[in-house]
Image (cartoon, rainbow, N blue to C red):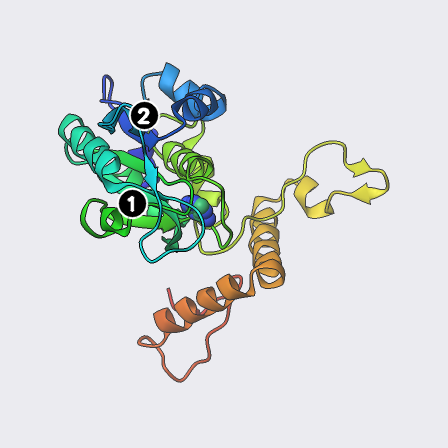
């Protein structure tokens, strides 16, 4: 979606629907009451429902987990209540993408957040607990399975809240200043340039002079170069991908010329 499309949500546009399927619905309800997401809900841009998976159990103990086949430690979430919650939610929220939160899912990233923010049916986020969810849910009931990082959380709720936040702020009308999205970390394949505010000197540490020069072209150049330098330092994996993309883009136009990063110069390919 272009930035201009993001900037102007039509009046009375439907709110973006999220449903979180969880054993701890209050944890989700409390978290989404705050900050940008809370304001997005209050403004009618977002709708967030937390559904208790235990409401889809059928025994009098409301059992949601069981021992793993094949043995091993811990408990596994039973498929029937999770599948029941997904089925009921799909009926209420047609077109929704159902995503299982799991440490063994594919990595969640900004490109995925952008794609999901464009899905009019919204998202259903399924939170696992214990040793995880019976694999038949990932195989036959969810559309996707994502991890928010290479570590194991004690439940999917915090991961679902991370995904919800990253997607919600890209929904038109949720952020006050949509233009800021274009400059953010990961939007252009780099981490964001460093930001400073007043005072100009803080405990002996000065703000770079160029940012106070009023020269917009020089500020833009400083930011491009600082973003690239920081990306090389903290995320060499991302910096290498940007170099690859630049080389790929330039190769068909002039294969004999080596690719170069940084500020455009006269004679560069467009
Ligand atoms: N559940 C447990 N760990 C997780 C992770 N890293 N990402 C998503 N869901 C999880």
Residue 265 sits above or below residue 170 on the image? below
Q: How many marks?
A: 2
Regarding mark 2 in the picture, which secondary structure is present there?
loop
Q: Nearer the viewer, mark 2 or mark 1?
A: 2
Which residue appears at 36% of the width and 16% of the height? Answer: 43
Residue beneath disc 2: 61
Label 2 crowd bin: few (<14), some (14–19), many (20+), radius 10 Å: few
Q: Quadrant of residue 5?
A: top left
Q: Quadrant of residue 248?
A: bottom left
User: In the drawing, does residue 267 fall left or right of residue 213?
Assistant: left
Which residue appears at 13% of the width and 29% of the height? Answer: 91
Question: Between residues 219 and 121, which one lies in front from this camera angle?
Answer: 121
Report x, y in % for residue 39.
Answer: 43, 19
Report x, y in % for residue 63.
Answer: 31, 31
Residue 142 sits above or below residue 24 on the image? below
**Labels 2 and 1: the sequence-earlier one:** 2
Q: Residue furthest right?
A: 204
Question: Between residues 121 and 249, which one lies in front from this camera angle?
Answer: 121
The numbered disc on residue 115 is 1
Residue 163 sits above or below residue 245 on the image? above
Residue 107 sits above or below residue 205 on the image? below
Label 1 crowd bin: few (<14), some (14–19), many (20+), radius 10 Å: few
Regarding mark 1 in the picture, which secondary structure is present there?
helix
For the N terminus, the quadrant is: top left
Report x, y in % for residue 226.
Answer: 62, 55
Which residue appears at 16% of the width and 25% of the height? Answer: 92
């Amino acid at each position: 979606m272009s930035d201009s499309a993001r900037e102007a949500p039509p009046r009375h546009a439907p709110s973006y629907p999220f449903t979180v399927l969880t054993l701890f619905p209050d944890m989700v309800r409390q978290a989404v009451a705050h900050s940008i997401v809370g304001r997005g809900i209050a403004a009618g841009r977002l709708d967030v429902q937390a559904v208790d998976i235990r409401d889809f159990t059928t025994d009098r103990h409301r059992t949601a987990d069981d021992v793993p086949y094949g043995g091993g430690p811990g408990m596994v979430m039973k498929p029937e209540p999770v599948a029941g919650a997904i089925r009921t939610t799909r009926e209420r929220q047609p077109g929704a993408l159902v995503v299982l939160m799991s440490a063994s899912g594919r990595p969640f990233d900004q490109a995925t957040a952008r794609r999901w923010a464009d899905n009019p049916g919204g998202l259903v986020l399924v939170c696992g607990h214990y040793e995880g969810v019976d694999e038949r849910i990932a195989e036959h009931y969810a559309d996707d399975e994502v991890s928010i990082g290479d570590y194991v959380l004690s439940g999917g709720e915090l991961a679902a809240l991370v995904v919800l936040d990253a997607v919600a702020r890209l929904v038109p009308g949720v952020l006050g200043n949509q233009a800021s999205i274009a400059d953010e970390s990961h939007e252009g394949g780099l981490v964001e340039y460093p930001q400073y505010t007043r005072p100009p000197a803080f405990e002996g540490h000065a703000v770079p002079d160029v940012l106070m020069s009023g020269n917009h072209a020089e500020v833009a150049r400083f930011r491009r170069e600082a973003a690239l330098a920081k990306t090389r330092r903290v995320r060499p994996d991302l910096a290498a991908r940007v170099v690859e993309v630049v080389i790929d883009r330039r190769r068909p136009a002039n294969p004999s010329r080596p690719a170069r990063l940084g500020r455009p110069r006269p004679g560069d390919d467009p």
